[in-house]
Image (cartoon, grey):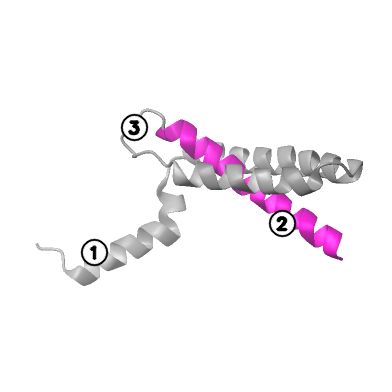
Amino acid sequence: MQKTRFEVFYDSLNLVFLGFFKSSWKDKAINLLSILFGYFLFANFITKFISEGKNELIIIPLIIVIFEIIVRIKPLKKSNIYLIWTLIDKIRIGAVYALILEAFKLGS
């Protein structure tokens, strides 16, 4: 039977919102560990540089520029380095979460 446009749209929405449940346990574990590692690494990294009081005006924008470069150089899914890029991207997501949490802590 032929797929209608609505079925294609529905399948794409299902993949976006529920795609996490369709992946294997290995992918889920690697993704979760990468996010937590990124959070832990950058929470300590950012706290160290902010508590020292030196170069925080240079370090934070530099980190943000590095994050943007990571996002912009996304390889194709068929590429050999796609898995490595995915891990680095998940670490970046954890680091952004740590950066935002630290900003809220400083703001309150």
Q: Residue at x 68, y 49 (%)?
A: 61
Which residue in the protein does label 1 denote? 8
Say which quarter of the image contains residue 17: bottom left
> What segment is highlighted magenta in the picture?
82-108
**Left of 45 or right of it: where is 38?**
left
Of the two numbered discs 1 and 3 in the rendering, the one whose residue sits closer to the viewer: 3
C-alpha span from label 1 to label 2: 36 Å
**Three-letter code for the amino acid on which mark 3 is drawn:** Ser
Mark 3 or mark 1, which is nearer the start of the sequence? 1
Q: Which residue is outermost to the left?
A: 1
5, 29: nearer the viewer? 5
Report x, y in % for residue 83. 44, 33
Report x, y in % for residue 20. 46, 51
Mark 2 or mark 3, which is nearer the start of the sequence? 3
**In which quadrant will I find the C terminus?**
bottom right
SS state under label 1: helix
Which residue in the protein does label 3 denote? 79
Q: Is residue 32 visible?
A: no
**In which quadrant will I find the N terminus?**
bottom left
**Three-letter code for the amino acid on which mark 2 is drawn:** Ile
Magenta stretch, main secondary structure, is helix
C-alpha span from label 1 to label 3: 25 Å
**Three-letter code for the amino acid on which mark 1 is drawn:** Val
